[in-house]
Image (cartoon, rainbow, N blue to C red):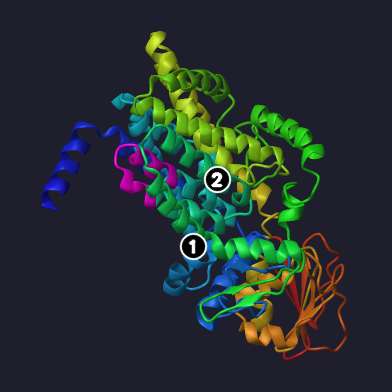
Amino acid sequence: MAGRLNGAYLYIKKNPWPLLLFLLGAVIRILYVGSIPPGLNQDEASIGYDAYSILHYGIDRNGVHLPIHLIAWGSGQNALYAYLSMPFIWLFGLTPMSVRAVSLIMGLLGMIVFYLISRELFTSRTAGIAAMFFIAINPWHIMMSRWALESNLFPTLILLSVYFLLKTLKTPRWSYAFTILLALSLYAYGTAYFFVPVFALTTAILLFYIRVLKLRTILWNGILFIIIALPIFLFVMINRLKLQSIETPLFTIPKLTTPRMEQVSSVFSGDLFHTAVGHFQEFIKLMISGNDGLLWNSISPYGYAYPIALPFVLIGLVVMLRAIPKRDHEGRGQAIILLWLLISVLMACVTNVNINRINVIFYPIILLLVAGFMWVTQRIKGLGVVSIAGFSLCFVLFCNAYFNEFPDRVGPAFYNSIGVAIQYASEESEGKVYITDKVNMPYIYALFYEKINPNDFLVTVKYTNPGAAFQKVYTFGRYVFVLGSPTIVPGENAAYIYWNGDTIPALSENYKINRFANYTVVITGGDL
């Protein structure tokens, strides 16, 4: 152990740049992660509360015991992120920071693994430094690491599995680590249902063709994959064929109200060929523009990798394609990356495209950026320094936009201050709490910030549209979710939460009013 630590120290001493760049990337991902983005997205609150509920009560908010996939709103939410969040919720309580901890850690881990993969792909030490630089400053990766969307798990799980796949090229026993991680990624996001089986099959064929793995080893890996993937396969079949849920002492395979995978992917819609061309056109537009129009996915004009990256990416694609015939370790490794890229593009053809739905493509794109940058800078003297300066300037401007302008822009979309408004209203009044509908699924914020026992929620909840894909709660407990802005009932001991754009009652000696960033609480009745 001491020898390994000493070896690591000597390596860092001789090659400090990867560590320094990693620390730069870590600071940018960690700084204010609990408050930027401000507030919580409804999906963050949903997965956080369900994780809290399962951790402390053994059931999610829909009463399902240890679900392998969350029912959430009705149409489902992938469960792996929730289970990985539980240690942080247990240690630090249910807060935005504890829910975002998994994304943050996966982002930091992703930088390290990305660097290690680049060392496997490119023999040059400079390429490793370039890889750490480009992943540390990448806007997609920074934004992905800072909020708790469950799909944020998927690309880094694939990155880890690909790292073990590259290790397999030298040592076949690493194939089992590859298989385990690849199968687990099926529980991370719905687009994995297309990507993972295709990637598993094609890599198995490739490894057998180049005689890295024997048929017996591939079969054992196949059995391992099937065992891990079986519950999620049954989940897809239950919801596709409208069968009954399966309950076991260890887990439950639930039936959703409406499977969302049919809304997101045309693979399950029966309209694959008709829509594939349209999806591909949207994909090309996104790749060129760098933006999908969603505030939480990208900031214009920086996009997913900065506009100046695209020429390097295209050059890198040509460089990697030319490396395939070499049949050496480097060429085989780059062939795997191109296979990853190709299947990601095919996935985009069967998916309603936005950045988080096709996020598995961005790691290979950044690897293409590294390959293109290395090829160009080795042939044009001085261009490397100019390029690094250009990317560094883009990074500084992006950080300024993210930390100074982005919070005000995205705060309303993440319902900034609804949590403190609910907490204040609940504490200041013993009566009902009426909440404006200017919040997407406002009930989840009451569950999250008040840490409601899911059993109490299940006993009292009433839905306006039970059985819909997105079930809306009319009331539970003492919380009432109104249409429009709340109407004050004279003489009632109650709390009313308004959006600041609503018409808020004029000041009165019978009212107590407290204004927050985006919401205002009016307390009536009682001892005011």
Q: Residue at x 46, y 29 (%)?
A: 335
Stretch of the chain drawn in magenta = 161-176
CB under 8 Å between callouts 1 and 2? no
Give, as a three-letter code, the residue at label 2. Answer: Met
Task: Check disc 2 and report its element: helix, strand or loop.
Answer: helix
Magenta span: predominant SS is helix
Q: Residue furthest front?
A: 216
Of 469 and 269, the residue lying toward us: 269
Residue 168 counted in the magenta span: yes
Return the residue at label 2: 143
Q: Determine if residue 158 is in view.
A: yes
Residue drawn 37% across the image and 33% down it: 118
Q: In this view, does 158 lie above or below 254?
A: above
> With respect to residue 455, does 94 lie above or below?
above
Within 10 Å of disc 2 (Cα), the crowding (few <14, some 14-19, many 20+) is many
- Residue type at mark 1: give it: Ile
